[in-house]
Structures are given as structure tokens and as C-alpha cells.
Amino acid sequence: MTGWSPELLNEHVAPGFDQFTAADMPDLRPEFPESQHWLADYFLNSVLRGRFDDPQRQLVLGFLRRTQHAFDAYHSARELTEAFLATRSEKDSGVYGYYAAVSEWEWFAVDYSMAVELHNRLFERRVFEKGDRSAESRLYTIANNVKHIAHSLDVHPDGFPAVPLWLNNWSLHSYAGVSITYGHAAAALRDMARLADRLRDPAALREAQGDAG
């Protein structure tokens, strides 16, 4: 790809950096046209139509914030990844563009993990059970690897890669063999986005639950 050897790039930039040439990352924005209005809608609906009681009110707001941030970070990461792949060349390895994309993927994973924690406080059904190896569990683990990199370096001093999260043509990766495909990451986010669509209007949600009962 450049004048630098693959070994140097993979050691000092990220694992598999020299072989990262494509990525199929679903665009969820057409499925969720209200995604940019979740927080504003929640405020207006809570003031004008009906609100959740405390502490549910604060938990729902936290969930909506983290889900909207995760949604935005995912699509920013998607765009930055596409830009990196389109512009790297034999003369430019694209390190800055790669790290810009990785940073957004990290924010996506971290905000997703925080949305999971708030979800689990709000509902009796957990997003995943510890150790179940689901896509949701793996994405949550990747977020923990990003957040606790200092501890990870203590635990794996000799086998830790240059970065706690890296990309290949199919997946997001982290150390200890944890990975999730772009499609599965999008699916995990999609589930949170569907819930955000419902929670943004407390009165409508109560009416729907009443009709269902």
C-alpha cells in the first residue's frame, strides 16, 4: 500500500492495517428518520403531553441521549471509514484518517455500552446475559476494552496491540479475540433505535401499552 512494510504498519498503526481495503457498513438513517429529533421530541412530549415519573424520567433521558450519541457516532464512523478507504494511496498510508475513524468507532461502542446499562435499569429484560457471546455482549466488551485500556495493558503487557479497537474488511476487533461484524453492530444499534423511537413520547407509549393490555 505504501513504502512502509506491512509488518511496520501492522505493529505501529493497528493489526491488519495493510490489508484493510473495504467495509460494508449498513446505513440506518433511512430506517429512523426521527433519530435526530429523539431528544427534542422527548422534551416537548414530556412538557406538553405527559411524562414518566422519577427516577424513570431521568433513566429514559439518559437512554435516549446515549442511543442518539451512539447512532450519530456510528454514522460518523461509517463516513470517516469510507473516506479513509477512498483516499489512502501508495504515497499516503492514511494513518490520520484511519485513527479519526477508529475514534468514532470507539465512541460508538462506549455510548452503546452506556445505553445498555441504562436499558438494564429500566427494564426487567436485560440486553444480554454475561458471557453469552451475543453480538450485544461482544460490542459491550469491546467498549470496556476501550475504556479500561490502562488496566488491559497491565493484564496483557506482552500481547497488547497498538490500539484497543481496530478494523478489518468485515469487523470491529479488540484484543482477546473479541470482534463483531459491521452488520451485527448495526443490528445491535437498530434494536436500541427502535426503543428510542417508542420512548420519545411517554404519553403515546402509555396509550399503546394500555391498548395492548
Image (cartoon, rainbow, N blue to C red):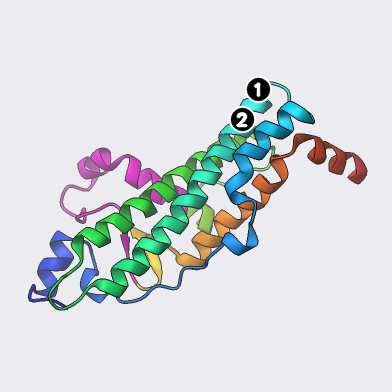
Please determine whether, in this image, residue 83 is positioned above or below residue 188: below
**Up/down of 20 relative to 49, above or below:** below
As displayed, is residue 145 above or below residue 43? below
- Residue 121 as seen in the image, left or right of residue 110: right
**Residue 167 in magenta stretch:** yes
Q: Residue 59: which disc?
A: 2
Q: Which mark is residue 55?
A: 1
Quadrant where the C terminus lies?
top right
Labelled pair 2, 1 in contact (Cβ < 8 Å): yes
Q: Quadrant of residue 28?
A: bottom right
The residue sitting at 64% across, 33% down in the picture is 60
Helix, strand or loop at mark 1: loop
Q: State whether residue 128 appears in this view.
A: no
- Magenta span: 139-168
Residue type at mark 1?
Answer: Pro
- Quadrant (top left/top right/bottom left/bottom right) for the N terminus: bottom left
Q: Amino acid at mark 2?
A: Leu
Can you give x and y, in whole percent of width and height, for residue 71 in the image?
52, 51
50 shown above or below 195 = above
Looking at the image, which is closer to me, 47 or 82?
A: 47
